[in-house]
Amino acid sequence: MSTAVHVLQNRLHRRNIIVNEPIEMEREEEKAEYEESLEMREQAIKNKAARAARIAMFKKTLKINDTIAALLSMVGLLFAILEYENYYSDTDKKHFETTSYGNILRSFVSLSTMILLIFLFSHSRTCYKIHKEKYSTIYHSTYWESKYFIYFLIEAFINIIHVPPGMNFSFFTFEMNQLGYTYVYSISTIFVSWMLLRTYLVFRLFALYSKWTGQVAESCCGPEGCEANTIFAIKAVLKDKPYETIFLVMIASVTIFGLAIRNFERPLYYQKENEGWFKDYSYIWNGMWLIAVTMTTGNLYRVMISILIVLVGYGDYFPRTNLGRFVAVLACFWGVFLVSMMVVTLTVSSSFEHKEAKAYDILFRLNVKSKMKDKAARAGKLVLQLAALHKQLNKKTLTPQAHLYKKIDLRNQLTVKLEEFKNARNLLSDYEVSPEELLRQLTEKIDRDFEEIKEILLSITAIESQLEELEKTQQAVLGALNECMIFTGSMQNNLIKFKQNFSLELADETLPDLG
């Protein structure tokens, strides 16, 4: 009995191996492929999250770095302006002579400049890393080969120019003659004016602290195929807060250009032979006043004339030096741009929306109709007065001469009122919708309705194709189920036959034992 059971188990085991082995191998392969795809997908998600985390970290570092760089640039510029005031002053010393106090200020300027260069290099490296993380699959150049290294060299050239300590620039002065006048410039004057370019570092913070370049803005701009960069942020701010933006830019422009033109005009008015037409530029407000009136009252035609004679503003302060005129021309062009931006802003803010424009047109037509009724009533009143005047003449209550004068006066008034009525009617006709305009609006509405119907039909067609694909999938699934059922039925039949054969074999083996 035990031998027969053992034989039966071996046969069942061999049959299970033969039947189930291919199916199990196929299932294992599918399971391995599915697990591999899941691992690849999870790895891609992890890589994307890690890349986003690195970019966020780099942007945070960039914000801190650029904030410190902007502060260093402004501190260095402030020390340079204070040193220049001391360097230019003639109190207890000659012009263009350095003092110990001036050397201390210059030392601070040099120290802040050296530290600033380090932060500018860090800014360039961080921008390179951000760009490389965003485009890691197509960007393979090193930092030294990239455009960011070139940008760093340009920034370093702009910011490294300053007045170093321990150098007396009295040896580096040069005279200029213009319009019969002589004035002296020093290299310090040029360097301090050049350092005003450092203010761009402050404006660069705008893109880092603006909500229009944040993570939410990037997530909104990405699907639309645009970037949430500085240009996008400037456009968004001008649309969101136009008056505040233009006002702040105007103040900054007046300050920067005012300092520059003061530096270039000041030496001319300090010469002894020019005291007859002395203009006091020792006060910064006078330079700002000159730039303010130049930017707001100058236009392009006056800019072209000011290349030969710079007579912009009110004339109480105007530039006479070549460099001063150059700054004034730049300020005038920049002022034209800002004023045009203000005009555009006012135009946009005062323009009606579509619904408001419709309401305005209706109100305007009602007002014009009311005025027409009033003018028609006045004209009718004058006609009645003329008729009454004719009756008075028949009754001889008026002399012919008085009747004639009054008649001429009433006719003149009637002519004026009729002309006003005619003008009001013409104005109303301009705002009335013509049949052509009604036909155009109706055509546009029909086109819009047809476009909507077309979109609905396209969506219905897409849904039908999806339903057909779903039906095909269902049929394939039903076919597979039928095959499974057939295979299951065949397996059941094989098992039944196997049981019958096994019972017969068992009976054959047990019969001799019983005998």
Image (cartoon, helix red, strand yellow):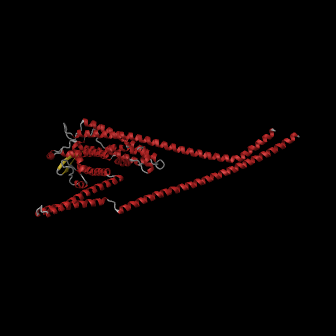
Please identify the residue farthest to the front as the structure is shown.
395
- In depth, the one of 307 and 451 nearer the eye is 451
The vertical placement of 282 against 394, above or below, is above
Q: Which residue is drawn at 64% across and 46% down?
A: 27
Residue at 45% across, 46% down:
134
Q: Name the quarter where the C terminus is drawn.
A: top right
Residue placed furthest toward the right: 515
Q: In which quarter of the image is residue 107?
A: top left
In the image, 168 versus 190, the foreground residue is 190
| Marker count (numbered) | 0
Q: In which quarter of the image is residue 125?
A: top left
Residue at image position (38%, 60%) is 441
* Residue 380 visible in the shown view: yes
- Residue 93 position in % (x across, y down): 19, 38
Residue 194, visible in the rendered structure:
no
Q: Where is residue 35 in the image (x, y as percent from the top left)?
A: 59, 44
On the rendered structure, is 12 left or right of 74? right
Q: In this view, does 53 lie to the left or right of 266?
A: right
On the image, the x and y values in percent for residue 213 come to 40, 45
Quarter holding the N terminus is top right
Residue 343 placement (x, y as % from top left): 29, 51
Quadrant position of residue 284 = top left
Residue at the image point whose x is 21% and y is 51% from the top = 312
